[in-house]
Amino acid sequence: MTNKREDYISWDEYFMGVAALSAMRSKDPGTQVGACIVSPTNKILSMGYNGFPIGCSDDDFPWNREGAPLDNKYFYSTHSELNAILNYRGGSLENCKIYVTLFPCNECAKAIIQCGIKEIVYACDKYAETDSVIASKRMLEAAGVKYTYYQPSGRKIELNV
């Protein structure tokens, strides 16, 4: 095997790939989202995906998007970013970077800001025009948290597991 530069994936490809793979753990039939938190020295610190809290069965709580508040997923599910933050047990996340497959909502933006993460790399911003994401961007900008769209390389990476 040669050691040419094209034999290796970039850090962004690697970490967004981890976030995308994490998203595949979500049982949400509508939107699977993943997150990967990385240290300033490119070490993976934590991962998360959207789902219900520990002890809350996927079979007992609703995944619907519609219906009364107690009959849909929004009061019960935890977003991938918050799960990644809560899953970290190593101390501070100050100056870290988070890779997410979907741009963070306003609630996740608050958690990102509060824990000291300084950069977001996101793969999709399909809710950009919603009040939640507009508020998110307003807070992130005010707090000095950089957000960058992930530019896919077009490279196809296959995994056989």
Image (cartoon, rainbow, N blue to C red):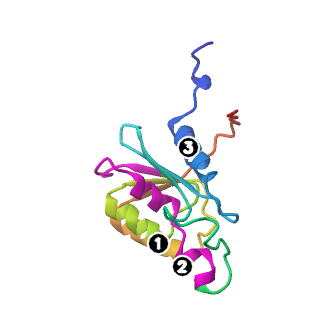
Residue 114: quadrant of the picture: bottom left
Q: Residue visible at 41% across and 38% down?
A: 42
Q: Which residues are magenta?
A: 70-98
Q: Nearer the viewer, mark 1 or mark 2?
A: 1
Q: Which dot, 1 or 3, sits closer to the camera?
A: 3
**Residue drawn at (30%, 52%) of the image:** 94
- Amino acid type at mark 2: Asp
Q: Front-most of 152 and 55?
A: 55
Q: Which residue is mark 2?
A: 131
Q: What amino acid is found at the position of numbered circle 1 in the picture?
A: Asn
CA gap between label 1 and label 2 equals 9 Å
Q: Quadrant of the C terminus?
A: top right
Residue pointed to by mark 3:
18
Image marks 1 and 2: residues in contact by CB distance under 8 Å: yes
- Tell which of 67 and 115 is nearer to you: 67
Query: Which residue bears the numbered disc 1?
Result: 106
